[in-house]
Image (spheres, rainbow, N blue to C red):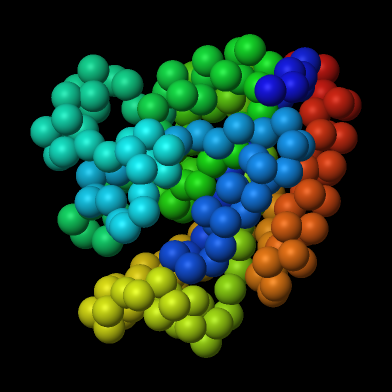
Amino acid sequence: MPLSANPILLVLAGPAGSGKSTLCERLVQAGRGFSRVVTTTTRAPRPGEINGVHYHFLTPTQFDEKLAKGEFLEWAWVHGDRRYGTLAASVLAPLGRGESLVANVDVQGVASIREAGARYPLLARSLATVFINVGPAQLKERIRERGDDEAELARRMATAEKEMQESAKFEFHIDSGSRDADFAALLGIIDQARARLATRTD
């Protein structure tokens, strides 16, 4: 993995179905010098998901144990009964080695990561946040394509409304269109983030 004196922690957020995961995976595979932060969740794996690759899948008890030890950089309840989090070591250690990272985190988690920047200067320096905007009709269609039932669709749409209210707090935005257009927009954002870091003296 290429190293940099100015590594970037690129954090993507947006409603379920906005394409965050796809953009993360495509960026990693594109050979642009990014590796993916594998976040942690208490939800069950979906078909085809692999522990340690897509997420670290923990039981609620295992999650509690790591939380009690202060191992999370951020964590939050999502959809009422599930927890998601980012282990501090999975972010700070790679950044310290000069590795750029990309993460898919919900809006609550991004807020916690911003707050953690007060404790970790490297985190604050490296962080670039991106929100993916998706219209309601397009979002419903994408969620249905994932195979979620109507109850899950309603829950995710309600969550999406709340998430959209936080979009102004993000540095960069992508108005979602085609997958190729979204990826091109993401590459442009990375160029802007690298240029910003190159001019910083802290």
Asked if 186 appears above or below 36 in the picture, the reply is below
Residue at 74% from the left image edge and 65% from the top image edge:
180
Percent position of residue 12, x then y: 58, 50
Percent position of residue 8, x then y: 69, 31
Q: Residue furthest front?
A: 48
Q: Who is closer to the viewer here, 71 or 196?
A: 71
Looking at the image, residue 131 sits to the left or right of residue 17; the answer is right
Can residue 120 be seen? no
Q: Quadrant of the C terminus?
A: top right
Res 122 quadrant in image: top right
Looking at the image, residue 184 sits to the left or right of residue 9; the answer is right
Percent position of residue 170, x then y: 62, 52
Residue at 56% from the left image edge and 62% from the top image edge:
19
Q: Who is closer to the viewer here, 197 or 19?
A: 19
Q: Residue furthest left?
A: 61
Q: Quadrant of the N terminus?
A: top right
Can residue 133 be seen? yes
Residue at 32% from the left image edge and 21% from the top image edge:
71
